[in-house]
Image (cartoon, rainbow, N blue to C red):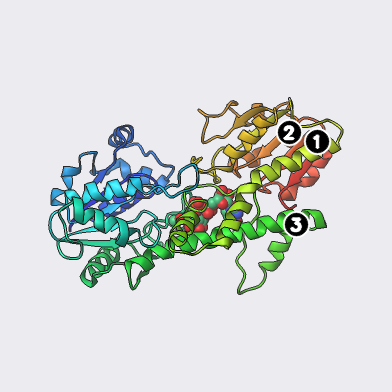
Amino acid sequence: MEKIAVIGLGYVGLPLALLAESKGFNVVGIDLDIKKLKVLKDKKSPIDDPESKFLLNKSEINFTNDFTVLLDVDIAIICVPTPVNDDKFPDLSIVMDASINTAKNLKKGALLIIESTINPGVCNELIIPAIEAQANHKVGKTLHLAHCPERINPGDTKWKVNNINRVIGADALDSLELAYSFYSRLIDADIKKMRSIKEAEAVKIVENSFRDINIAFVNELAMSFSKLGIDVNNVIDGASTKPFAFMPHYPGIGVGGHCIPVDPYYLIEYARSNGFEHHFLKLARSINESMPIYSVDKVEEKLIESGVGSLKDKNVCVLGLSYKANVGDDRESPSKVLINELEKRGAIISTYDPFFKNKSSSNNLNDAVNDKEVIFLVTAHDEFKKLNISLLKNGSIFFDGRNLFKNKQTQFIKNNIKYMGIGA
Ligand code: SAJ
């Protein structure tokens, strides 16, 4: 089997490297993070993925930060982050550096695959020119290049790197066939060949923008229906009985992560630079980004309505720092915007997330909720389902940012706790 290199050993690259090794490929893993390399060499997994933890135990992958190990590699796969910076502008520096440094060390005839999420145009207009200028390769001639956007869903126990359908794109037909042959041996799922590398880049951005706008739709419904006295979650469940043409999404205190709140900006900026304004995508982003502050406003209104004044000097607990249930990742998490807004309003804030004990001010759930006047639930971790509602302070507000307890509202009422949900 060919020798494979995976560059970027995070929640995308590490499972991919371990899967390739389990399929008999000779694998090397490259990452710039020395601490991460040490953890990996100690057979510990830096990501919350049970399968990776298991495979790592018996893995013989050479984890290194030395790009010269690429000299005899046949296929190199780039799995590095493609974030946005503070003003929501795409930051392609990491994927550009990784692609160039990799290509510089690849032999003639090698295949370079980009799995990182990139907008249409990045390969043709940025990566290929940079490789041909700096890495002494002619893409399509001395170096094969393909794009196969990653589709990892962190925390998902059903859909994993080995069984998720993929799309691949390359501008040279032989490069496309090489990439197709590799993924056909790697995964047990469908692989769709796109007509160009640009189409493959567009697929990932479209699938994640689709999710963002659908979440924005139900978030806007939640804000509207709360004024109409309608529980939007029940309505979504009702609409979900339609066996076709409806896909449920649910309102929440915000949209976090390294994908959904980020990827639309890649298309917005690329389209803008080519003369088109994505008003709809931008509006969806602004609705989703408004949810943490909308939640704070609703709670402060309730406090004032109850005659206890504003959030200033109130003891407030934030349950959940992660952007998503049962994973330890706080990138673009709504908890950050929420905590910042609560600080601005003078609240006394404590936090608890079982996946971020080192960042939490409380070290367990009971301590975190004890004697608090307001509790915001930001992340629907399984651990929070064990919350003992009778421990909550009499007369306090519980803002359920993920509607985790929407079917237990009577328990809150019994304990004289003001339960507030999103759209509930
Ligand atoms: N969220 C909502 N309402 C929803 C769904 C999600 O508010 O109905 C929020 C979540 O709480 C979270 C954010 O949106 O803060 C993102 O949630 P996510 O479930 O989309 O989680 P991600 O970011 O891990 O998305 C990944 C993506 N996978 C890739 O990009 C390869 C995405 O494409 C998948 O659709 C998604 O997993 C998935 O299906 O779970």
Query: Could you tell me residue 21's position as x and y percent?
Result: 26, 51
Pointer 2 and pointer 3: residues touching (CB < 8 Å)? no
The three-letter code of the residue at mark 1 reads: Leu
The residue drawn where x is 42% and y is 45% is 49
Which labelled disc corresponds to residue 224? Answer: 3
* SS for dot 3: helix
The residue drawn where x is 85% and y is 38% is 305
Query: Could you tell me residue 152's position as x and y percent?
Result: 42, 54
Find the distance from the CA under tag 1 to the CA under tag 3.
21 Å
Q: Nearer the viewer, mark 2 or mark 3?
A: 3
Which labelled disc corresponds to residue 53? Answer: none
Pointer 2 and pointer 1: residues touching (CB < 8 Å)? yes
Which labelled disc corresponds to residue 303? Answer: 1
Query: Could you tell me residue 73's position as x and y percent?
Result: 17, 52
Q: In the image, 328: left or right of 132? A: right
Neighbour tally class for label 3: few under 14, some 14-19, many 20 plus, Cα within 10 Å: some
